[in-house]
Amino acid sequence: MSTSDAYYIPHKAVWPVIGTLGLMVTLAGFANYLNGSSIGPAMMIAGLTLFIVMLAGWFTLQAGESESGMYNHGVGISYRMGMMWFIFSEIMFFAVFFGTLWYTRNLSVEWLAGFGDGPGRATNDLLWSGFEGGWPTNGPGEVGGEYEPMGAFGLPLLNTIILLSSGVTCEWAHHGLLKKNRQQLIKGLIATVSLGFLFVLCQAYEYHEAYTEMGLTLGSGIYGSTFFMLTGFHGFHVCVGAIILSVVLFRSWKGHFTPENHFAFEGAAWYWHFVDVVWLGLFIFVYLM
Amino acid sequence: MSANVAAHDDHHDHGPEKGIVRWIVTTNHKDIGTLYLAFALVMFFVGGTMALIIRSELFEPGMQFVDPQFFNSMTTMHALVMVFGAVMPAFVGLANWQIPMMIGAPDMALPRMNNMSFWMLVAGVLLLASTLFMEGGAPAGGWTLYPPLVLQTGDALPFAIFSVHLLGISSIMGAINVIATIFNMRAPGMTLMKMPLFVWTWLITAFLLIAIMPVFAGAVTMLLTDRFFDTSFFDAAGGGDPVLYQHIFWFFGHPEVYVMILPTFGVASTIIPVFARKPLFGYASMVYATAAIAFLSFIVWAHHMFTVGMPVAGELYFMYATMLIAVPTGVKIFNWTATMWKGAMTFETPMLFSIAFVVLFTMGGFTGLMMAVAPVDFQYHDTYFIVAHFHYTLVPASIFILMAAGYFWLPKWTGNMYNERIGKLHFWLSAISVNILFFPQHFLGLAGMPRRIPDYAVQFADWNMISSIGAFIYGFSQLLFVYIVIDTIRGGTGEKVTDEVWEDAKKHSLEWTLPSPPPYHSFTTPPEKIPTEHF
Ligand code: HEM
Ligand SMILES: [Cu+2]
C-alpha cells in the first residue's frame, strides 16, 4: 500500500503538550494578575510565548506533511469535519451572549421595571420603584453613570461593508485557487487580510470614542456589558481569522495548495465567513435594533 | 466512508516510544485511552476522599471535624472533580479504547488532537486542584457556581473559571475527534445502523458536548467579567439578572448530566446482550430513544429552577417537557429487560453490575419524575431528596457501568482474566452499600433536610449516621477494584483468555475478532466481516 492512499497516523506529537503547557501558564498568570499578584504578567508572557512557538511549530509540521503528500482524501475529510464542528462550538459560544442580550433586553429589564405578572411587580415596588426599563439601559442603579448609546450608521455601517466585502474577496481568492490562478489567489488573500485588519482598526477607533467621548464603557450597566462583550469577542475572532488568513497567504506565496489539496485555505475561509455572519447578527441586534 | 488503511510516519518502528516519554507524546488511541482511564480512576479516589470528609462531618449532628467554609468547599469540589475529573474522562477513555476497535478503524481520526485533549484535561484539573491551597479556600458556592454567592470566592475564583475553560477545550476536542472518527473511519460495510450502541451513544454524546461546553465557558466568562471588569450581567442594579446565570448554566447543565448517562446506556446495551446470549432487543428503537433523549435534554433545563420565580407558563412548560424524557428512557429500560427475557443468562461480574444498573437507575429516574412535577418540587428542591436522586443516576448507574466496562473489557485489553471471586465480592459490597448510603437520603430530603449544610437538626441524626456508614463501606470496597485492575494487568488468574473472551462475543462486536491483547494499531486493514447480531 503506497502512502498516498493510506490514512496517515502520526506516531508521536510534542506540540500538543507544549501548547497545553503554554495555555495553562498563560491562564494561571492571568488569574494571578487578576488577584493582584506581581508574578502574573511574567507568567502570561512566558505562557503566551510558549503557545506561539507551539502554533508556529505545529503549523509548520502540518504544512510540510501536507505538501509532501502524506494526507490522503480521508485525512482531508477528518480535518474538514474537525473545522466544521469547531466552528459550530464557536457559534454556541456566541449564542450565549446573543441569548444574554435577548433575555435581559426583553425579559429581565422589563421585570425590573415592574411589567408582567411575575415577581417583577414586587421587585419594582420594593427595590427599584421609579425604574422604567427600556433599552438601552444601565439598570435601575444607573451603573457607570451617564453614557451615550452607540449609533448604527457611520462607523458600524462602514465596518459592515468592509467585512462583507472581505467575504467576497475571500471567495474570489478561492476561485483563483481552484482555477490555478495563483495571482488571483494571492491578491484575493491580500485584500481579505487587509480588509480584516482595517475592520479591527475601525473597531478600535469606535471603542476609543466610546470610552473617551461617549462615557460608554464595559461598566455601563447591562447595555455596556453586552455591547462590549459581543463586539469584543467578535473583534478578537476577526483578529484570529486575519492571522490565520495571513498564514494561508504566506503559504500561497510559497506555492502551497492545489485545487485538490488545500484544507488550510478552506478551513480559514469557513472561519472567515463565520466571523462575517456573526457580525451581521451583531449589526442587526446590537447596533440597529 | 472509505477503506482506511493505516500509514505511519515511521515505517520501521510500529511500537510505542520507550519509558515515560511514550505516555507524554503518544498519539495512539489505546495509550491515550489508558491515560484517560488511569487519570479518571485516580480522580475517582480524590473525589471519593472529599465525599468521605463530607460524610464524616455529617455522621453526627453538630460540628465535628471541619469548619463550614471548608465543608462547602468539599461539596463543591467533590462534584466538580467527580463530574469533570472522573466520570467524563472515564467515558472518553473507553471511547478511545473501544470506538476504533468497534468500527474497524486503525486509530482515532485526529491522533495529535487526541493527545492534546488529554493534556488539556490534566491542565484544567491542576488549576482546579490548586484552588484548594489558596487564600480564601477553594470555591464553596456549589458546583453550579451561582452568582452572586460564587463572586465572593477568594483568590480561587479566576483559577476555577479558567479551569472550566480548559476542561471545556479538552471536551470539545475529544468530542470533535469522536465525531470525525465515527463518520470517517468506519470499515466498509459498517453502516450507521450496524454500529454497536456504545458507538452510537458516544456519537450523540459528542454532539451534546460540542453544543454545551461553549455555553458553560460563556457563563463563567461572564462571572469573570462581573467580578473583575465591572460588567453587570448578573447584577440587577445594572439591569442584569442573577437568574440569567441559572438559565445559561442549566442549558449546559442538564445536557451535561446526559453526557454522563448516554455512554452509560451504550455500555449497558453492549454488555447485557452478551451475557443474555441474545441480540439486543429493539436496536433501532435504542438509537432513536438515545437521540430523542439528547434532543429533549436541550429543552428542559429550567426544571432545576422551579423555585426561582419563573412565570407560571414557564413552570408548566418545563414540567411537561421534563416528564417527556421518561418516555424514551422507559423504552430503553424496557429493551434491556426484554433482552434478558428468556435469555441463557450467566452472571459474571460485568453482568451483575449491569443488572444492578438497570434496577437502580430506574429508581433514580423515578425520583427525577417526582421532582419534575413543579408544585411538589417546591418541597424537594435543595433538599437531600435531590441529592439521593442524582446519586442514584450517577453512582449505581454511571459508576457501576464504568466498573462493568472495566471487568468486561480488561481481559480483552490485557489478555488476562480478572479474579471473578474478588469481582463478585466487589459487586455485592458495592450494590449493598450504595443503597445504605443513598436510600436514607430520600427520607432525609422528604423530612426537610437541606443539602450543602455541615450541621443539621437532631431529628435527622439516625438516617445520616446510616448513610455515612454506607459511604465508608462503599468507598473502601472500591479499593478492591483497584486491586483487580492492577492484578489483571500483571497476569490476573494466570488463565490466558481467548480472542472473544466471552462466549460468542464475536457475534456482537468487532473488538472480539482481534487478538487479546489487541495489536498496538487496531485494524491496520479493514475487517472483512461486520457482526450483525443485533438485527
Ligand atoms: C427521567 C429522567 C430524569 C428526570 C425527570 C430528572 C429530573 C430532575 C429534576 C427535576 C431535578 C431538579 C431538582 C431540584 O433541583 O429541585 C434534577 C436534578 C438533578 N439531576 Fe435529574 N432527572 C433525570 C435524570 C437524571 C440523570 C440521568 C442524571 C445524571 C446522570 C441526573 C442528574 C441530576 C443532577 C446532577 C441533578 C442535580 C443538580 C444540582 O442541583 O446540583 N438526572 N433532575
Ligand atoms: Cu436536569
Image (tube, coloured by chain):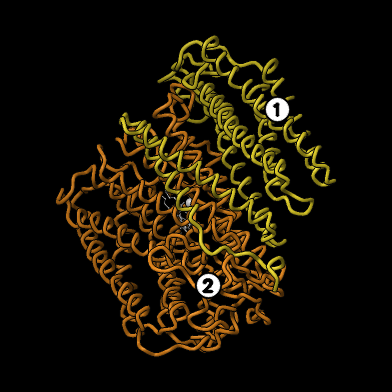
Q: Is residue A121 above or below residue B194?
A: above
Q: Could you say which is closer to the camera, residue B510 or residue A125?
A: B510
Query: Disc 2, ligand 1: is the CB inside 8 Å?
Result: no
Query: Quarter holding the N terminus of chain A?
Result: bottom right
Classify residue B345 as left or right of residue A183. Answer: left
**Residue A166 pos. (x, y %):** 74, 31
Colour displayed for chain A in the image of the structure: yellow
**Identity of the residue drawn at 42% across and 65% down:** B37
Query: Quarter holding the C terminus of chain A?
Result: top right
Q: Is residue B135 above or below residue B516?
A: above
Crowding at mark 2 (Cα within 10 Å: few <14, some 14-19, many 20+): few
Q: How far apart are the alpha carbons under marks 2 and 1?
A: 48 Å
Q: The chain drawn orange is chain what?
A: B
Residue that carries the numbered disc 1 in the rendered image: A195
Q: Is residue B427 above or below residue B499?
A: above
| Residue B509, quarter of the rendered image | bottom right
| Residue B178, quarter of the rendered image | bottom right
**Identity of the residue drawn at 63% across and 40% down:** A244
Ligand 1, seen in the image, is in the quarter at: bottom left
Residue that carries the numbered disc 2 in the rendered image: B13
**Residue A179 pos. (x, y %):** 85, 46
Q: Secondary structure at mark 2?
A: loop
Q: Amino acid at mark 2?
A: Asp
The numbered mark 1 sits on a residue in which chain? Answer: A
Q: Are marks 2 and 1 in contact (CB under 8 Å)?
A: no
Q: Amino acid at mark 1?
A: Leu
The numbered mark 2 sits on a residue in which chain? Answer: B
- Asked if labels 2 and 1 share a chain, the reply is no
**Residue B494 pos. (x, y %):** 36, 89
